[in-house]
Structure formats: C-alpha cells, structure tokens
C-alpha cells in the first residue's frame, strides 16, 4: 500500500471513530435520561431473608441479609417503540449507522390484503418516517427495540466477586451495588437514591451493551484482541477498541457533568485588586527581567503565567472549570489533552495511562481527545465564559493603564 493511500485510510478511520464518539455520546445520554425513569419499570422487591425467583437475587449470604430490587421494562413493546421514535427524531436514519431500520420505504405500502407494500416509490424522510395516505409510518430499528426490551436493572447489596460499584452483563442486566444505602426503602425510593450511580455506570457500560445489540446479541470478537479483549486483566482488554470507546464516552460525560458555570469576574470584587497589586509587587523584578513593565504590560500577553492565566499560583483563584477553559484560551492544547487523559480517561487507574497503550492506540486516543477539545471551543459554556473573560481582561488593562473603565 502506498504511503498516500495509507495516510488516507488512517485519516478515514480516525474520522469515522470521532463521528462514532459523538453519536455514542448522544445515544448514551439519550438512554440514561429517557430510559432511567421509575415510571418505565415494574419493580420486584425482596426483603432481607426472602429468596428471589429465577435467579433474580444476587448470590451470596450477605446479599440475603439485605433488601434487593429488580426493575424490568413496563409494557416493553410500547416503551421500546416510543423510545425508538424519540431517538429517530433526534438522529435521522441516514446519520445513524448504529441502528439501521428494518425496512426501506420501498418495502412498505398498503396492498389489497392490508399488508404494507411500496407506495409511489417515495423515500422515507430524514427522520425515518414515510408518509402514507393514512398518515406517517415509522421505520422501526429492531435491534434498538430488542436492546430496550432486554434491559433490566438490579440493586443488590454487594458483588460476591468484589466489584465495588456495578457492572453490566451482556444479556442486558445492569447490576448496581447499594451497600446498605437502600435497606428499608420502597422500590421508588430505592430507584431514585441509586439512580445517579446507575447513570454513572451506564455511561461506561452502555457502550459494551450497545455493541452486542448491534450484532444481534451474538458474541463474535471482531478486533485483533480476539477473546482476550474480554479478559479485563489482559493488555488486549486495555487496547481493545470497545474498551477505549467505553472509557472515552464515560470520560466525556463525566467531564461535562463537572463543568460548572464560572463566576462572572470583576476586578472590583472584594480584595481582588489589592491581591493583584501585591502579586505584581512581589514579582516585579522577575517580570522586568523578562522585559515586562509590571504595571502596563502584565495583562497584555495572555500567555504570561501568573496574573490572569495561572489558575493556581496567581492572584486570581480560578474554579476548576475556569482552569480547563484557560488552557483552551491560552492555546495550551497539549497540556489540556495530557491532563484530561490523566484525570478523566484513566479514572485513576495507571493501566490506562497513555503510555500503556500500543503506539497506534496512543495516536488514536490523542486524536480523539483533540477532536473533543476542538468541539469545546464551540460549546455554549465556553463561549459564554469567553465573553465574560474578555470583558474582565479589558477592565484589568484599563485599570493598569489608568484608562476609563468603559470604552
């Protein structure tokens, strides 16, 4: 293969993966908010000492001493179709390679015997609907529907194998461990108490659940890792494309939940101007040594560590969200990416450090986080902060240069 063709193939692969990240993130967000509602489920409650039926209760003597809850879809065919329609309204069929529709428009239409056949040869509209003389008809995605119908949720006391928070079986059972926090609660109380934990675990586990759903729930290893990619102790698991995507989606969503609207800065806020003057006085010699006039030039260069840009040692104590935004603002992309991978992608587990991946997957991971970083520049949160930050810096420059505060 020529170098040009190889570069093109690698670029096409990375582009496909990044589009997939965005779609998976949207799908995980949709399912965690639309599916995880108490009114969508029937509940089974097993008090302490009561055995479950059909393997409903988690194994182990400790689990038998505590409350146990199982939730499964109510009116699953109606629920799955309702969610399928909502999902298709969010993501047009032609933009959704995850869950294709069962039929094309040409296979539908009202025939003499009442069955659907083709009608006028018109294509379905972009949301998966086509228009029949009796009204719009929906092109369902059977794998999406089957995925919803198979989903179950179980709150047990603890995992006999020692997993602390929870995990999801490939047959659709999400196991959440409550460690006594819902003992004595009603099913609805238990559902709501553990819902944040369920949502957080689903951020990761839903990727592992979506992939077998896409294949019709057939375990067929498709990547180079073979069956070893399912062994969490193996390097093949760390480097499997499915695990990487699951960790990325989990990290993206956790990062976004942690972003909080920063305060609107003003140099007149209590004590700030005194802190700024004190900091400049303390660092005047150093600033002048680098060719800066500490009072007129200190805020002209936005990459100057200390005054406005350094969120930790400067006079302006920044929030964690501001610290991330400042890395974007000062164009410190490499630092952002490395810090983000270390704090969010690894989840504190050194097995998932960047250097512990294959060279190819290191580039894959860096590229996908870089692409995510670019999307943050366009986000509403960053754009709102940027507007306030530019005004704050204008105030500072005016104050340093003894110019009018309003221009």
Image (cartoon, grey):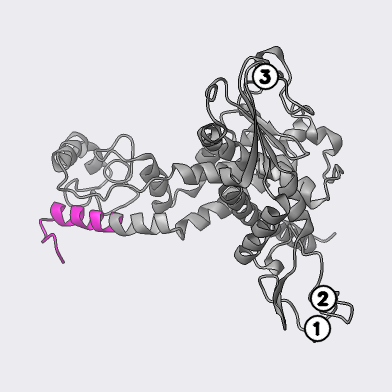
Residues rendered magenta in the picture: 389-407
Q: Which part of the image, by quadrant, shows the C terminus?
A: bottom left
Q: Name the residue under label 1.
A: 119
How far apart, in angstroms, are the residues tagged by discs 1 and 2? 7 Å
- Residue 189 picture location, percent across and down: 51, 33
Q: Can residue 329 be found in the magenta stretch?
A: no
Give the Cα separation between the discs numbered 3 and 2. 51 Å
Labels 3 and 2: the sequence-earlier one: 2
Tell which residue pokes out farthest to the bottom in this image.
120
**Quarter occupied by residue 114:** bottom right
At 17% from the left and 37% from the top, the residue drawn is 275
Image quadrant in which you'd find residue 171: top right
Dominant secondary-structure state across the stretch colored magenta: helix
SS of the residue at dot 1?
loop
Name the mark on residue 108.
2
Viewer-nearest residue: 177 or 378? 177
**Residue 210 shown left or right of residue 320 in the figure:** right
Based on the displayed image, in which of its 4 quarters is residue 310 positioned?
A: top left
Give the crowd class for mark 2: few <14, some 14-19, many >=20 residues within 10 Å.
some
Q: Position of residue 21 (x, y in %)?
A: 64, 52
Tell me residue 35's x, y (percent). Answer: 61, 48
In front: 354, or 225? 225
Residues at marks 1 and 2 touching, judged by CB atoms closer than 8 Å: yes
Residue situated in front as seen by the camera: 173 or 394: 173
Residue 80 percent location from the top left of the image:
70, 54
- The residue under label 3 is 162
């Amino acid at each position: 293969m020529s170098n040009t063709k190889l570069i093109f193939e690698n670029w096409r692969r990375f582009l496909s993966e990044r589009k997939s990240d965005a779609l998976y993130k949207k799908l995980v967000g949709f399912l965690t908010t639309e599916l995880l509602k108490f009114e969508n489920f029937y509940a089974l409650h097993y008090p302490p000492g009561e055995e479950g039926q059909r393997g409903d209760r988690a194994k182990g003597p400790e689990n038998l001493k505590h409350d146990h809850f199982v939730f499964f879809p109510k009116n699953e065919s109606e629920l799955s179709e309702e969610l399928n329609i909502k999902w298709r309204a969010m993501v047009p069929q032609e933009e959704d390679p995850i869950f294709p529709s069962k039929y094309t428009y040409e296979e539908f239409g009202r025939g003499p015997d009442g069955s659907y056949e083709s009608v006028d040869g018109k294509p379905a509209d972009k949301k998966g609907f086509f228009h029949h003389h009796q009204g719009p008809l929906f092109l369902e995605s059977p794998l999406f529907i089957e995925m919803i119908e198979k989903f179950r949720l179980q709150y047990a006391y603890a995992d006999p194998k020692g997993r602390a928070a929870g995990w999801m079986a490939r047959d659709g059972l999400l196991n959440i461990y409550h460690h006594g926090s819902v003992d004595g609660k009603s099913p609805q109380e238990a559902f709501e108490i553990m819902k944040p934990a369920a949502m957080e675990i689903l951020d990761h586990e839903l990727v592992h659940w979506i992939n077998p759903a896409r294949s019709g729930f057939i375990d067929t290893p498709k990547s180079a890792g073979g069956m070893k990619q399912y062994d969490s102790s193996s390097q093949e698991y760390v480097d499997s494309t499915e695990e990487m995507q699951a960790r990325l989606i989990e990290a993206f969503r956790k990062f976004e939940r942690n972003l909080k609207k920063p305060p609107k800065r003003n140099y007149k806020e209590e004590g700030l101007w005194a802190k700024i003057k004190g900091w400049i006085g303390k660092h005047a010699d150093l600033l002048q040594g680098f060719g800066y006039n500490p009072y007129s030039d200190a805020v002209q260069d936005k990459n100057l560590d200390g005054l406005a840009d350094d969120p930790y040692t400067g006079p302006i104590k920044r929030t964690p969200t501001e610290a991330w935004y400042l890395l974007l603002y000062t164009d410190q992309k490499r630092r952002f990416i490395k810090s983000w991978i270390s704090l969010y992608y690894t989840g504190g587990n050194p097995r998932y450090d960047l250097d512990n991946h294959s060279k190819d997957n290191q580039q894959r991971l860096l590229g996908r986080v870089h692409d995510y970083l670019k999307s943050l520049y366009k986000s509403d949160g960053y754009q709102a902060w940027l507007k306030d930050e530019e005004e704050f810096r204008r105030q500072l420059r005016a104050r340093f240069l003894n110019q009018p505060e309003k221009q």
